[in-house]
Amino acid sequence: MIALINNLPIKIKMMLIIMFTSVMSLLLAGAVVVIHDSYQSKKDLVNDLSSIGKLIADRSTAALTFQDSRLARENLSALHVKSSVIAACIFDEQGVVFAKYGAYNDKTMAVVTEKKGKPGGYRFENEQLLLLEPVLLEGKQVGAVFICASLKEYFRQRLYFILLVAAIMVFSSIVALLFSSRLQTYISSPLLHLTETAQRIARQKDYSLRATGSSNDEIGILVTAFNDMLKMIDTQNAVLEQRVAERTAELVEARDRAESADHVKSAFLATMSHELRTPLNSIIGFTGLVLQGLAGAVNEEQKKQLTMVQNSGQHLLTLINDVLDISKIEASQIEIASAPFDLAGSIQKIVQTVKPIADRKNLPVVAQVAPDIGTFTGDSRRVEQILLNLLSNAIKFTERGEVRVECCHDNGMVVTRVTDTGSGIKPEDLGKLFQPFRQVDTGLTRQYEGTGLGLAICKRLVELMGGTITVKSEWGKGSTFEFTLPVNLEQTNEKHSCH
Amino acid sequence: MKNILVIEDNEQNLYLVTFLLEQSGFRIVPARSGPEGIELAGRTHADLILLDIQLPLMDGYTVARELRRIPVLKDVPIIAVTSYAMVGDKERALEAGCTGYIEKPINPSTFVTEIGRFLPDDKKTTG
């Protein structure tokens, strides 16, 4: 019920409230009027009849005293003015009917007989008013006048009155309905307009719309507040749009700047790569040429010095390549190839490359490649670069013992491990090992040349290929560098050759 | 005597290559830019073309493609030379029509051998 009322539009709610109030008031008023009227009418009826009864009783004293029934009948005949009187009679002192009037039947008689002893009263019975008035002579009762009146007329009048009241109520209700339907619009129409405006704004997203309203009541305040809020939204939207436009423009500009900066950087890297290496290539090439004796005989001292030139040239080339590598990685401009290659072959190749340096230190380089390694899909050049870096480092920092490289399958990854028995790394230095431009224990490693970029490049490359690189080391005992690379999907058969 | 067309803009490198190859008995036709190389390639009967990839005016890949359009050069080996090759450089060079690929800095002791490997006939140089 409450839910039903809640779902009704405000217009109907207000009409219902007005109608309920007015109809309830009318009903109450009507009920009071009807009850009062019925009470008053009854009283009037009784008074009216009782005064006639008294009159007849007064007149009938003589008739009873002189036993003149004709006079008594005459007296009673005065009742004909009252059409409602059905019957009447006069009793003598002994309670015997002395004179009769009207339709005097047995039923009436029975009532009369019952009544005769208690004069001076009235009662309503069977839609009849029964009245008994005493006939007095010098204060002594000598008889009684009995009148029986029909209440039909009374009830007819009451019904008529009730119908009249009902008609008035219906009419008033209709008037109330008309008024309420007109009056409720004073409240509901601004609300409906406000609702409609809000819905239109929600639908059309047009915040320039405004609600109209002129009243100074709460609805007027609501309309004003609503419009004020719309104005604020409108203003804020405009501000936001402007800001978005500004920011977009800024971002576009920044992006363009960044893109052109990126472009400039790429172009710079390419140019540097070419410009720096071209003269170096000549230096290294000619040094090699002269060292080979192709341009004429070279004595031992010249050979020694030219070898130094060649080594320095090679070192400079490595530096340039490392710096360019890290720059390209940092600028995300590095590409990783994916082609099948012989990993065991690559390991052998790098071992052969570093062997001359190890031989100078009388350092054995042991390669242990699991037989199931086979073809590996990846960037051979980058894998070799990592291997070369790790092996060069291992040899560089190891004076005695051995350098060992192992390669095996482990849980979908190819694990490559480079172990040395060199100086090792202090625990506090392990963390910064893979950061660019760091060379561990700079004081000591003065004797080792290097860019400090090698491991940083290795880490980035391994990660770019989807693997990880880790280091375990004990200061003074040696280090183990391990990197993993994911095995391509074609080799789904899980192999475990690591021990 | 085998003719080798060397397209190289850097004088020092050109001299180095020329020196090494002439020592081994090749005749060198130098070209200092791509367009010059293309022009000379049509006229001289080069047995092999040594092509630097980083060239001014026209890059080596374009030069290689242009050279391959010349009918007489259809079967002449073109060897790309570049410093510190990046991923894809080799593929790009082969795609452009190069036969082989040599990285700088060149190693004087193996350079001639490497070149010789690309020469088609019996006169292969070894050493």
Image (cartoon, coloured by chain):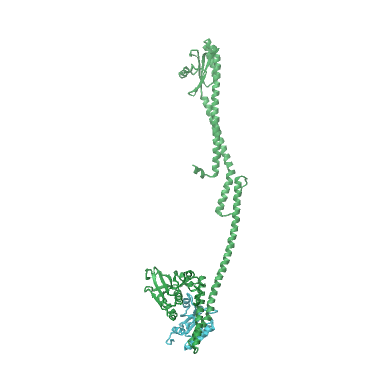
Chain colours: A green, B cyan
Q: Can residue A155 be seen in this view?
A: yes
At a point 59% along the width and 57% down the height, the residue shown is A237
**Position of residue A254 measured from the top left corner of the image (x, y, whole percent):** 57, 66
Q: Foreground residue, A176 or B30?
A: B30
Camera-side residue: A93 or B115?
B115
Decide: is A328 above or below A116. below
Is A359 rendered above or below residue A232? below
Which x, y percent locates residue A197? 57, 50
Above or below: residue A1 compared with residue A164: below
Q: How many marks?
A: 0
Q: Residue at x 55, y 38 (%)?
A: A19
Q: Is residue A342 visible?
A: no
- Between A340 and A187, the one lying in front of the other is A340
Q: In this view, does A418 lie to the left or right of A271?
A: left
Residue A230 spot, x, y in % from top left: 59, 53
Name the residue at the top extreme: A66
Frontmost residue, A262 versus A365: A365
The x, y position of residue A332, in whole percent, is 51, 70
Image quarter of the C terminus of chain A: bottom left
Report which quarter residue A478 is drawn in. bottom left
